[in-house]
Amino acid sequence: MARVDKYPLRSPLAAKELRQVGALPLRIQRGKVEVCLVTTRETRRWTIPKGWPMKDRKDCRAAAIEAEEEAGLLGKIGKEPVGEYLYWKRRDLHFDLVRVFVYRLDVTGHLTVWREMSERDVRWFSPGDAALLVEEPGLSALLEQVAETA
């Protein structure tokens, strides 16, 4: 009798690559650059605000909207990505490979109330500390670049 797995494994090679957009929120505090990170809702890992592209919106605008919804951040978003990274997105029964295109957000304000404020932690870090806190190697490398150029 053939065995049918209840939870099939998907080969990483068979996975299709999905696309997200993210914001890299930056500010100058006491003459030093800081990066804002948020926690993910389910696993509580530190990352940048990110999400799926939005219909009828430019990717840079979608990234700015994600920063506002996830972290309450307002600011000037760059028109072109400053970098990109890959990560495995956890699903109920499998993982998806996601490429995130990252846009710089020069933060000019912070809302007192925002959409996901009760679902995430939001904190400012030095770029070097932020690079150590995130789990995605590509995002860590991008944050280290910010630390070197700041």
Image: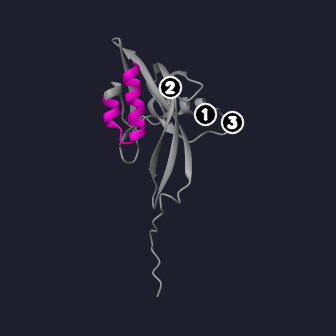
Q: CA distance from mark 2 to mark 1?
A: 12 Å
How busy is the neighbourhood of tag 1: few (under 14 within 10 Å), some, or many (20 plus)?
many
Give the image location of residue 14, x and y in percent. 53, 60
Write the residue at 38% across / 40% down: 137
Residue closest to the eye, 146 or 52: 146
Give the image location of residue 37, x and y in percent. 39, 32
Q: CA distance from mark 3 to mark 2?
A: 21 Å
Q: CA distance from mark 3 to mark 1?
A: 9 Å
Q: Does residue 59 show up magenta in the picture?
A: no
If the image is split into quadrants, where does the C terminus sit?
Answer: top left
Q: Residue furthest right?
A: 56
Whether tag 3 and tag 1 are in contact, CB under 8 A, the answer is: no
Residue 35: quarter of image: top left
Write the residue at 58% across / 27% down: 80
Among numbered discs 3 and 2, the one appearing first in the sequence: 3
Q: Which secondary structure lies at badge 3?
A: loop
Please state which amino acid type lies under the numbered disc 2. Answer: Arg
How busy is the neighbourhood of tag 3: few (under 14 within 10 Å), some, or many (20 plus)?
few
Residue 56 got which mark? Answer: 3
Front disc: 3 or 2: 2
Residue closest to the eye, 85 or 50: 85
Please state which amino acid type lies under the numbered disc 3. Answer: Asp
Residue, disc 1: 59
Please state which amino acid type lies under the numbered disc 1. Answer: Asp
Asked if residue 49 is positioned above or below residue 149 in the image, the reply reads: below
Residue, disc 2: 104
Write the residue at 59% across / 30% down: 60
Q: Main secondary structure of the magenta part?
A: helix
Give the image location of residue 46, x and y in percent. 36, 38
| Image side of residue 79 versus residue 143, left or right | right
Residue 134: quarter of image: top left
The stretch in magenta equals: 129-150
